[in-house]
Each structure stands twice: as structure tokens, then as C-alpha cells.
Amino acid sequence: MVTPADLAIKDLGPCRHPSPVAEKLGEKATVYVGEADKVLFNDRLSAVLADASGERPPAFELAGPRNRVFWDPKEVRAGIVTCGGLCPGVNNVIRGLVLTMAQSYGVPEIFGFRYGYEGLVARFGHAPMRLDPRSVEEIHRMGGTVLGTSRGNQDPHQMVDTLEALGINVLFVVGGDGTIRGAMSLVRAIEERRLSIGVVGVPKTIDNDIKFIDRSFGFESAFAAAVDVIRSAHVEASGAKNGIGLVKLMGRHSGFIACAAALASADVDVVLIPEVHAELDGPCGLLAHLERRLARHGNAVIVVAEGAMQEHCTSSAEPMATDLSGNLKLKDIGLFLRDRINAHFRARGVEATLKYLDPSYHIRSVPASPSDSVYCWNMARNAVHAAMAGNTEMLIGRWHGRFVHVPMPLAVRMRKQVNPTDDLWMAVVEATGQPLSFY
Amino acid sequence: MVTPADLAIKDLGPCRHPSPVAEKLGEKATVYVGEADKVLFNDRLSAVLADASGERPPAFELAGPRNRVFWDPKEVRAGIVTCGGLCPGVNNVIRGLVLTMAQSYGVPEIFGFRYGYEGLVARFGHAPMRLDPRSVEEIHRMGGTVLGTSRGNQDPHQMVDTLEALGINVLFVVGGDGTIRGAMSLVRAIEERRLSIGVVGVPKTIDNDIKFIDRSFGFESAFAAAVDVIRSAHVEASGAKNGIGLVKLMGRHSGFIACAAALASADVDVVLIPEVHAELDGPCGLLAHLERRLARHGNAVIVVAEGAMQEHCTSSAEPMATDLSGNLKLKDIGLFLRDRINAHFRARGVEATLKYLDPSYHIRSVPASPSDSVYCWNMARNAVHAAMAGNTEMLIGRWHGRFVHVPMPLAVRMRKQVNPTDDLWMAVVEATGQPLSFY
Amino acid sequence: MVTPADLAIKDLGPCRHPSPVAEKLGEKATVYVGEADKVLFNDRLSAVLADASGERPPAFELAGPRNRVFWDPKEVRAGIVTCGGLCPGVNNVIRGLVLTMAQSYGVPEIFGFRYGYEGLVARFGHAPMRLDPRSVEEIHRMGGTVLGTSRGNQDPHQMVDTLEALGINVLFVVGGDGTIRGAMSLVRAIEERRLSIGVVGVPKTIDNDIKFIDRSFGFESAFAAAVDVIRSAHVEASGAKNGIGLVKLMGRHSGFIACAAALASADVDVVLIPEVHAELDGPCGLLAHLERRLARHGNAVIVVAEGAMQEHCTSSAEPMATDLSGNLKLKDIGLFLRDRINAHFRARGVEATLKYLDPSYHIRSVPASPSDSVYCWNMARNAVHAAMAGNTEMLIGRWHGRFVHVPMPLAVRMRKQVNPTDDLWMAVVEATGQPLSFY
Amino acid sequence: MVTPADLAIKDLGPCRHPSPVAEKLGEKATVYVGEADKVLFNDRLSAVLADASGERPPAFELAGPRNRVFWDPKEVRAGIVTCGGLCPGVNNVIRGLVLTMAQSYGVPEIFGFRYGYEGLVARFGHAPMRLDPRSVEEIHRMGGTVLGTSRGNQDPHQMVDTLEALGINVLFVVGGDGTIRGAMSLVRAIEERRLSIGVVGVPKTIDNDIKFIDRSFGFESAFAAAVDVIRSAHVEASGAKNGIGLVKLMGRHSGFIACAAALASADVDVVLIPEVHAELDGPCGLLAHLERRLARHGNAVIVVAEGAMQEHCTSSAEPMATDLSGNLKLKDIGLFLRDRINAHFRARGVEATLKYLDPSYHIRSVPASPSDSVYCWNMARNAVHAAMAGNTEMLIGRWHGRFVHVPMPLAVRMRKQVNPTDDLWMAVVEATGQPLSFY
């Protein structure tokens, strides 16, 4: 038993001094002494209900196997489809789904649909692959997806046609925000036909930006690949007088990869993310900061997320285009910054050498790291357990370090972003020495 | 706002079929439908208090910077000591402590004590190193600790003598279970002299076995290194008729490294850990299982944690010895198993080729992975914030995915172990195809 | 003793059948039976002279230490300068020069000139660094050069001024073709002043294109880094219907990196290098080949050296510009191909997905591989031995697998290129299945 | 045209000073000025014959495709067998043999014999695998051999029975010294029956100890893996007061791996190899050297090849045993040194901490590095070209950087070893600072 007294922290006395951190970052970035929030020792619903009467607070269902299942495993015909951009670990997830279904439940028939939702629409002519333990045994050693992928949703009714034709009763959908919305349309179409087909999601987002998934699979592998590229930028910057290394990383709306890669590499001087506004000009702007950095240290490394500073390179006159998945086509902030920085130093008469690195696809195509491999295995296992129990229109999430069931409508309701007043951004600010924002 | 209704999971109907998983693993390993516990959406104490009246449940203080601090940063003279066995990331922690103190708080004097607690005892003659941002800038690229380390505790009064002589008022202790106990003795000796010296711990355990730290730094890097060795064992086992690869990994009391490395490598057929009993002989024993595996697949890979199956290789007649840290000296289960397996197949007239790999120190000496680097940086930052706020006899923990303050007495009260009825072990059982235990 | 009879190869009889290889590649690519040339068992000059009378054939002086040296080591003041683009292993070479001079010869003073030849010209104001064993001990763990680098040559007389002012009598120049020409001008300026200053080169070329250096340092590390990127291109190409991965690699005039990376990765279907002409259009052109490949295999990976196919993207109207080192500024063949291939398939109504990867600086900034580390150490050692023996205007080469002395004028007389009728290109052709050329 | 004058090296004057290197290493280790041998510019036999009359000196036949072949490719039934210990790159060689035969020559039937020569003997019951381009496409991503391997030779007549039964007319044998001797017996048995079966070898030796192969495949990958382990030993040694890291590496008779790994890692202080005698005791012995090193630097890293110093741990009373391949079973020099060093420092009252690392199988089971992958591809291609031309009882060698044909009897006549008076050992001595020998 752990009591509140067990968790009391000893201190040496009252805090009499103002904190230099609070002075530097602003009080918003810190917490008043004695007012820091606390984390419950036991965050299971049953524990709270035992202690308190009254209404049930919101709580996620824990993932895992159940003693009874909805489907007779021998009659399950399962399908797997992978959608959207590549992400490390997709093959691990496919492998985990197939092995758990076949070996733990004895599911006899598993189909892999090719090239995303296209594979569920007959007119594209992509015949599904038969998957079994032997065919997936070694696929985790490579990045990417053996099923292929494509962007964009398809007509849900045509997809249900295919599911019916093949007798699929459980479909696993591996994909991001847009894919989950597609899966929700599919569920509506299934319900309209009063069919019994479960649709279970394994959320995939290399940007780590899906809410209720405290860590998305592949994220660690991706930012580890980015660290290598940042090291090269650092080496290039160090090798030249006033050397600047500029690295563009993924992150359309959320700067998690940029932040994590910068913290891991310890060689980054400026991080620019979509969530934090940055001015180029003025004494508090990026260019002036960069100039001061070069004057003092002789080189600098900048990491910019692809979605950062879009307001600088778009104009209201020219509306942004969208891709097949409905995502806005971003302007290339990397090339924009490269040109603006070069122009600035030329104008100032400072000889600077900027090296620009855009690793793009290289980062998302690496195989899953050992840690991500474990994670993908558990994601996949729990997705199978959830599907066998008859759940539908839900995905496997991760909350407070535990795998949970998340309804799809909740998952797409909001996006996870770096909170500029929270811990991660502050860690970046402390590590890089940059200000909270360039304004 | 998220309500309970938002978290309700849709299903296709009641679960009418018994689960093959429950039948295979036993009902204890699974959860009755509808009885699965739930995870609170909001596990902050303030949220619970808002909803319910009554007593405060136990809760951890969240880590992070405060708006006011106990120490005048300019008067802080800090010390850092690293104790016990090596672990990936120790240099990252040292670097993070020094950079945060110097750059975020302006602490002017930081000493690194050499070779563990020996460095705090004058008669060993280890002069402390002066640490500053420049001297620690590159140390994270190498494994190990630039301060050196040693096993075992020292006389707390002699250690306080050194702290007093140098005017140290904040001491950071990086170490495991035994080291934390040593730090608690030190705090008592400080209190006896009515000194104002804060002692803050950064918990280090390559075995990931400290309670209230849901992931210890270096753990991911260590099991990633183990995955490479397991791959070699798999290659060796595949290259010979009836090839057996046997890998001994760390894990004195807890099998986390063995479990994680096995899940990540996907090449392991048997995992043996201290928490799960395993018989060698009999129809349900390891040797019979191994024989069946060879008959079917022609090869096998076994991963054994160093603390597993000790009951097989010790005798009551010969009491176990202890090392300088007070740890029991384990028998070498790797060599024991190698000999017993070889003897078994020789006796059965089966030609088998066993290759034994003991990576030992190699695994704990690798540099921190990118993910561990981020983690160490955050551990170190939060330790400095805690120390500056005047906290003492506490360490930085990780609970439900957040950094928290953990009192040292609580941290050493129990050990974290793999729960054989919980998710991790079940994931291993599903991945390897081995039974829940060899009995 | 080995006699000609010992080297006679047994065969089973005369060769009566035409070779399918000769038919496919053309007879030029193969050798008539019985006419294959032979490699001398002993290629030392002394062996030939013992056997035959007559004139001495051309032969390289073997590198290595001598029993007597020209310089009194205690009076040597050495300088090191690194020029041109980064290349893996430059820091290893610097380290090897310093350690060998200091530890093997006892040279007391070693200066590192900053930022290439600029560091030898006073008006740039780059103060030289003092180098000793301690300051270089760990530099090989990072790519790049601790001395910095720059492109282009400087006025030789101003450089001699600096050498005289500092009393330098031995200068090591690490650089490529242009740098060696700069060193030759420097030697002439030294000779004009009748000074005794030795100038010894360590040839650096990431493109592996210096003649008389059968393998340049850093080359293996560079193409190993390229293999990772090609793997990503392969993963991307496999993940999409009619997926094409296009990778641009270094290689201004010589396609060695492209060839070696393609052979090592085993995932490449087309290699394009400067030495082999390639048409885009027509039935034997690249685009038709690519179309056939997609039709049969559904995906393709193309590796193009930056200097390949320049005739396609330049026009005589627009003369090519040059950079500071006097190198022609190449057109971007990667972007050109990307656009042409996309346009081709659009015009043909084939839905294809091309992913373009340009790793650029990432490849040249990696640390030296273990094999390159050994090689750099030997390059550096032998450069010191040569310099101590009083040699000048020469560089360390590698001929028939042995380190030799190469006069600078000879080294810059011609460039090493892939011979389209020789073994390397044929290995590529066999591995990729592409024709000898796209004409 | 290159003339002798083109190769003349400029110098600054006569060498008047004795060399400190010669003084330190002894004159035997260096070369008299002006007496250094030279390397022929052109080492092709045709070049020498053009210049000189008289007898043909010994020369190797160059490898490569011929315009005509002995076998009608469509009638070739090929076999591949891999023997002896694992080595990085064996799968690459298998893949290269199969792809070149199938794709370049159109060979229709290729068999892979299982578990070494056992697979050629019917009573072992190992059915051969059918190999084709599809089945070998991905095998190079893993270490080891998909065919399996075993030690020891089998009865040549029983092996010919199998070849005859299957109609094999070309057999590729991948193996080392013992395997080549086995292949020679097989050739004799084939000749006795007047059969037309070609036997072509691809020499495999992780120790790099086969003569006439200036670099054996897998060697670079193996020593690169060793470098990682040495780094761990260095980290461990640095982490403890008087820390000693002791690493045992492969090398039964030849210390190439130990030397190369030591040079590449730059962290090694002592290298012990079979070719260089080392005393333990006495003022010039290893233990005294180690003691001096600890006194000055506080730590040391020792690399010992498994075949080194055997005279210290064997006694004439106890004759050495042999394994199935006929190799002498070596005593474990690693454990011997560990115990002797520990005993020495205990006796001297010096507290030292020795960490022993024995990576054993881990090093030989890694996948081939990019550079080795290229090399294996070329080895395999040239083996096929040689076999198609009807050659037999020969293997592919590497001489002066070119692939050549080497008669098997010549290849096994002597073993390649580190020459203690030659360049490699001197490079080690300069890099480690150890004496030429501990005597």
C-alpha cells in the first residue's frame, strides 16, 4: 500500500529566490511553488470509484485479450490494409497482426489489400495477397509496407462490395487521420447494409500528431534517422567559416520530430516548428539571432519542420492546393529559408556558407528500431484482441503508458501538437539556447 | 471536453465464444469481458479533486521548473557522482545536469566526483574534476561515464566531510538501488550535522527494475544492443543442423531486457527470466520443449536472463557470496544451460550444435540511442529543477508517462519485476510460442 | 619459390561454346580464351631486374620509414592544411599525421591551418591551431575536418610568406585535384625563394577519381552511406504502384560511388554515370527501358551520378559556370530526370509514383568506417615517413595494393574514370540487368 | 605513356639524420634510404614480355568472362556447397553465384547442398535445395549461410556418387584451407572416374589467412564488428580506476583481425597475435608494460588473437586436441590472460579492474558490409566465369588488387600471416605505442 505520506517530498526550506529560468522564459513557462499539479498514483477507474462516490469520470477501456470473444476464430476472414505515407514499423504491424491471428487465435484466412484503399475497390484491379505466418516472417527487416500504399479515400460502398465478396468480417486499417476518417465512412456503409464486419484501426502517424496516442509507432525510428542527418549538418557547419547547416524535417502541423531530433542530437541551435511563431526580421527575429550566434560561435545548425513558418512563404492571393488525401500542399520552407538566410548575409557583407539538407523520404523508409519493433508488436496484438472481442470503429491508443481502446470519432476530433508552454518545448529551448519564440 | 460517452467503444454484439488465447494461456492470463479496468482520461490530482469530495488519494508531485527557487543560483556549488555498473546514457545525464545548471541557472561551480562514492572519501585520493559546459559538450557521444564509477557505499560521515570541505550544497547521485540507499544514509548524516545540502537522485538501472520509473534511462539502448547479438545467435543456429543459439543477457532479478530484446528481435524461441519458474526435465520442461522445437524447425534460439533459474545451479550447502554493492553473486546460468543442453542431446543421441553468446559488458557500454538521449536530457533537467527548488532525498521518476518526484525511501521499498500474469510476459509468450512456464 | 608451373590452371578441355555473356554484352566486353592477360606474381622492380637485363621499366617508389631522415625531427615545424569538400576520414588523417610526427619522430611543433589555403594567407585573419596528440585524440569519431576547409587556391607567394613567418619546414596538404595543383604552385614559389620546405600531399577525393590511388580514403564510407539511402528509395518504390525511386549521388566526372553503391545495395535497376552515354528517348533509351521494367516488376530504382547525362540538360547557348575551385557548375541531373520521367509516364497515361532522394552533404559528412580508419592511419603514417625523408611535391598513392610515392605532376595529369569496357562496369551491368549503354 | 622519369620523386637533399623510428623499432623494421624497392607501374605479363626477352616469370591468370565457354550453359547443372565456420558474406556469394549463372548464362538448374560436405553424402539425408534468382534475392541481408554448414571433410567417393546421381557438372565450394584440401581430394576422385565435373573454389577465411588472396571476403565486416566491442572495452576500462579492458578476437594462426581492429578503433594499447612472441614476465614482458601503462594513463585496452601466446597455456605433457576440420583445439588465451593479469596486480597490491569481453560468434555472424557486398559479388561473378570456361581445381584469388585464378594446390601450400617486420605490424606498433615484441 502506498499512502499520500509515502509520496511527500522532503525539502530544505521555503523558496525565497526568483528563478533565473522563470525570468528568462517568462512566468508562463514555469509553475508556482506549491501549485504544481500531481499525478495520481493509481489512475485506474476502479481505484477512483473505490475512493469516491458520484459520477464516473471519463476513462479509456484497457486493451488486452478477453476470456470470451465475439467471433468464432475459425470463421474469421480477416483483411489488412495500409494507407498513406510510409512510416517505420508498418511491416512489423502487419507481421504482428498475422502472427497473432494465426498462432494465438487460429484464424484461417487473412488477406492483405494492396496499395491502400485502392485495393478495396475492384476497378483498380489490385488482387489481394494471401498472408500467413510464413509469408510475413521476415518482412519486419525492411522498412515500408509489403502491401503497398496509396493516398486518399475511396468510395465506401465499393469497398464494402469487396469486403462482402471476399467474406471479410474483420478489417484492420493502418493509417493516419485521413485514413481513420475513411474507415469511419466505411463503418457507416457497413451499418447501412446491416453487415457484421468489424473495423479496427492501428493509428500511423510519423509526425506523432494523433491525439490519445502518446507515442505513435515509427516515431522513434524516424527521429533517430533524422539525428544522423543533423550530425552531418553539424559537421558541414563546423567545416566552414560561418558555416550554417539547415535541415528540413517532417512535421506538417506538429513539430515533434524536429523537437525530438534536436534534443537527441545535441548539435542544434535553432528549432522551428509549426506551433511556434517565428519572425525573420527585427532584433528579436531569426536572422538577427543567427547573426549573433555566428559572431559568437562561428557556426549554427537550424532544424525546421516542413509546416513551420508557412505564413512567410504563402500569400493570401494564392490559395494553397491540396493532395489526394486532402492535405494542404505546403510551401517549401527549407528552400525559402535557405534563400532568405543567404540573401541576408550577402546583404550584411558577411561571408557565410549554408549547407541545406532535405532527407525527405529517407527518414520514413528506415526499418523499425528495436524499441519500435516491440511497440508495433504490442499495437498489433492488442488490435487483434480488440477485433476478436467484436469491437469496431475504434483504434488502439496509448494513454498514460498503457494500451487502450479509442473510439475513432474521438481520435480525429483534434490533433496533437507541441504545446509551446509545456515541457517538451521548454526542453528544446533549454537545450538550444534559443528564445521561447522569435517575435 | 471529453465525456464518458466519447470514450464508449462500439461493438458488434456479445462475446459468445470462448477465446483460444484464454484456453491456451489459462483464464488467469485474460480478463472477463466487461470487467477490463479502465484508465482515467485525466489522472491529475486536481481533476479528481474537482469531481469528488473526500480524502486526497496518493499522488506524485510533477517535476519541472518552479517560479521561485530555494537556492540563490550564484551560491550553488554542485557535485555529481555516478555509482555502480555502467549503463548507456550516464554521460548524457552528466552533460544535462551541467548544461542546465550552468546555462539555465547560472550555477558557477560544479564538481564531478571520481569513481563513485570513493570520490567523496578523502583517503582514496581521487581529486574531483571541474565540470563546465565546454568540458561536457561532447561526452554523450561515448558510452560509460567520464567520472568513472565504483561499486559499494562508503562511510556517510566521511562523505559529508568532503562535501563540507568543498562547500557543496547540492549533490546529484546517479545510481541504482544500492546507491540510493547510500544516498539515504548520506542524507541522515547531513541532517545530523544540521547542514543544508540537497541530495537528488537520478535513478540508473540497466535492468529497468526500479519501481516508479516506468522506463529507466539506457534500457532501450541496452536491449537494442542485445538484439544484434540475438541476431547473431539466430544466424549461428540457422547455419547448423539442429543448431541452438543460447544468449545470456543482463537481468539479475527482473527479466525486462530479455523480454524486450526477444520481442524486438522476433528470432527468439524461448525466454527464461527470474520471475518465471522453469523446470529442465519432464515432459513440460525446457529440454523436452527444445527437443520438440528442433524436431519441427531444425533450430532454436534461447535467451536467458542472468538471474533466471538460479535454483537449478545453486545448492543450499553452498551459500551465495555477495559483491561490494551487497548484490548476491549469481551462478552462471549460461554455462550451466549450455552444459545441460549439450549433455541432454548427447544422451538422446541427437546431433545438435549449440553456440553460446555472452555479450556481457558490450551491452552496457554502448552510447545512448537517440530516444535515450532525449530521455536522459529530460531526466537531468528535471533533477536540476528539483534540486534548485530545495528538494532532497528524492529522485526523478516516471509515472504514467510523466516525470515526477519520488521520495527515495519509497523507491527502494520494492523492486519492479515482470509480472507473469501481465501484458509483457503474455506478449513474449505469444511471440515465442513458448508456454507460460516450463513446469 | 613459386614457378610458372605452380600457377597453371587446370581445365576440363577446349572452350567450344559461344558465351551468352559475350553475346549479350558484345565481344568488346569479354576476352578471347587464352588471351587473357596475366598478373605478375612478383611486381617489385628488383624481381624483374633479377630476371631480365635491359632498361628499367617505370616503377613507383614504395612508401615507408627509412633508416635515415633528411630533417632533424627536433627542428621540424610542421603544418597541416585541409582543402576542398568534406570527405569521411579527413580527421583520421589529421590525427594520424599528428600522432606519427609527435610520437614516432618527436616533432615538437605542429600547426593546423584553418579553412583551407585561406589559412595560409595572412589577410584572412585565420590564426592557425596548435595541434598535439591530446588535441587530436578523439577527432576521428566525427566526420568533417577540425581545421575547417574552403574551396579554391590562393596566391602562392602570400602562402610562402606565412610558412616563412612561422618557420614551417614541412607542409602536409590534404586535398584533391585542384588542391594538388595549388600545392605545385606553392612548391614553385618555395623553389623561387630557394627555401627548404617540403610539401607532401595526402590525396582526398570522395569520387575516387584520382589516378594512381586505387582506392581513395573515405570512398568506402561514402558509398556505404549511399547504400542506406538507396535502401530507402527501394522501400519507397516498392510501396507504390509503379513506384520509382530516384537517387542522385556524387560523381562529377567519375561514377565510382554510383557503381559501388549499386553493387553493394543489390536493389538498383539502373545506374547512370558520366562515363557512359545514355539516351532518354527511343526504343533503346532509358525511358523505354524503365517502362519495360515497370511493366514486368512494378517498380524500379535508379541511381544517377551528378555528372551523368549533362549533355541532356545543358545547351551550348548557355556556357557552364565554374565554382571557386575552378570546377564546372553542373546542371542538376536529378531534378531534370525526375521531371522528364514524370512527364513521360503522364504522357503515356501510366500512373507512376516517383520519389526523389538527394542525400547530398549527408554522404560526405559521415565518420570514417573501420576500414577507412585503418586506411587513413596508413596514408598519414606514410606521408610523415615520406616528408621526414625530405621528399617534396609528391603524394601518397596506392598501387597494386601497396602505398607508394607519386609525383604531384603525374597525379594531376589524368583523371581516373570507370572504363565502360572494364570489369567494374560489367559487374554493374550484370547486377542491374541494364544494357551496356542506353543509346 | 608513363616513363621512369615521370615517377621520379623530388627531394630536398640527402638524408643526414638517423631516424628516431629506426632507433626505436630497430633497423630491421626500416629500409635504407635509396634501397627501398619499387612497384612496377605495369605488372601485367604482357608488359614485361614486351620489354624484355627471356623466360616468362610466374604470373596469375586474370579472372573475368571469356568470349567462348567450355560448357553449353543450358546443359549445366550446378551445385554450391558452403563449409566450415560462418563468415560475413557467404550468403552474398551464394546469391552472386546463382544470379550470375541464371541471369548472365541461363544455367537452368542450381542445387544448394546442405550443411557443408555432409550434404554431398547420401547417408546424412540432407536433401539439396533448389536455388533460383527469386529464392536468393533477399538472403544477403542476413549473415550466415542459407545452405547451412558443417566442419570436416567427407569421403570423396561418396561425394562423387551424389554429384553423378544428380548430374552435377559444375560444383562451387565456398570454404577455407581444410575445405580446399577436401575439394582437391574430390577432384582426384572425379578424375579417377574420368568424369567431366569442374570444381571451383571461393576462398573463405575470416582470419584473412589464405595466401594469394590479399583480402578475404567478410574480413572487413568482421573487424568492423570487433571495433564495436573494443569500444565497449575502452569505455569499461575508462570507467574504473586502473581499468583494463581485455578483448579476445579471432585469429588462430594469423593476427589480421586483431591488427586491423586495433588500428581502426584507435583505442587499443596492446595487441597480441600468434606471429609475435610475447613474454608475460620480466622488465620487457607484458605485465610490466601494462603496469607502466596504468601508472601513466590509468587504464588500458588489450586485444588478443585467440591463437596468440599458446606456448604460455599449453604444456608438452598434454598434447593439443583437434576438431573435426583437423584444426588444433586452442587453449583459451583470453581466460588465461585474465587470470594472470588479475593475479599479477593482486600480488603487487595494485587495485585494478579487468573487464573481459569475448564476442566470439557475434563477429562472424554479422551481415556483410557494403564494401564486402561489392567484393562478394565480384568473387562470385568471377567464379562463375571461371567455371563456365571449364576451369577446375582452382579458386578465385586477389593479387595486386585484381581478381585472378589460383590453383588449389598452390593456395594451400602456405598460410598468410602478419610479417612482424613488415608494414602492418609496424602500423600497429606506431598506433599502440607498444614495443615490437614483449620479450
Image: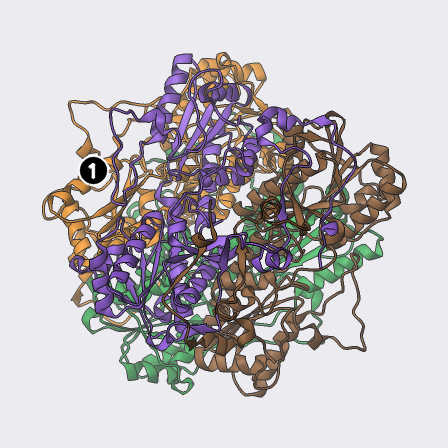
Chain colours: A purple, B brown, C orange, D green
In the displayed structure, does residue C258 sit left or right of residue C90? left
Q: In the image shown, does D223 or B232 lie closer to the viewer?
A: B232
Residue A149 image position (x, y, % from top left): 29, 53
Residue D71 image position (x, y, % from top left): 21, 70
The relative height of residue B180 versus residue A120 in the rendered view (above or below) is above
Q: In the image shown, does A282 or D131 lie closer to the viewer?
A: A282
Crowding at dot 1, Cα within 10 Å, few <14 / some 14-19 / many 20+, comes out as few
Q: Residue at x 29, y 23 (%)?
A: C322
Q: Chain of mark 1?
A: C
Quadrant, the C terminus of chain C: top left
Q: Residue beneath label 1, please?
A: C339
The relative height of residue A25 versus residue B55 in the rendered view (above or below) is above
Hey, which residue is sitting farthest left in the picture? C282
Q: In the image shown, does B217 or D118 lie closer to the viewer?
A: B217
Q: How many marks?
A: 1
The relative height of residue C155 versus residue C55 in the rendered view (above or below) is above
Residue C238 image position (x, y, % from top left): 29, 54
Residue D259 image position (x, y, % from top left): 57, 52
User: SS for tag 1?
Assistant: helix
